Amino acid sequence: MQDILLGFAFFLVIEGLVYALAPSFLVAMAKLLPDMPEGAIRLTGLVSVALGVGLVWLMHG
């Protein structure tokens, strides 16, 4: 449970940094989303999940 909370805390830190340091970039990216094919968005999400799982596996090996 501690690892889940730590992961969520890191997620909040990273998200907060994006909103605080690059709000215009975030808005520009959000405007591009409707034009992206659903498959590309899904693939990006799956790659992100795979990278996250891989990093957790490497750290906790």
Image: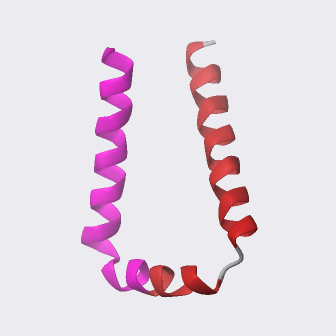
Q: Quadrant of the C terminus?
A: top right
Magenta-drawn stretch, dominant element (helix, strand or loop)? helix
Query: Farthest residue in the front direction?
Result: 38
Side (left or right) of 26 relative to 60: left
Position of residue 5 measured from the top left corner of the image (x, y, whole percent): 30, 26
Side (left or right) of 50 relative to 1: right
The foreground one among 4 and 55 is 4
Position of residue 32 measured from the top left corner of the image (x, y, whole percent): 56, 85
**On screen, 49 above or below 58?**
below
**On screen, 40 above or below 2?**
below
Magenta-drawn stretch contains 4: yes
- The boundaries of the magenta stretch are 1-27
The foreground one among 48 and 18 is 48
**On screen, 8 above or below 57?**
below
Taking the spot 57% from the left edge, 21% from the top edge, the residue there is: 59
Position of residue 2 measured from the top left corner of the image (x, y, whole percent): 31, 16
Taking the spot 56% from the left edge, 79% from the top edge, the residue there is: 33
Q: Quadrant of the N terminus?
A: top left
Magenta-drawn stretch contains 24: yes
Taking the spot 36% from the left edge, 53% from the top edge, the residue there is: 14
Taking the spot 30% from the left edge, 61% from the top edge, the residue there is: 17
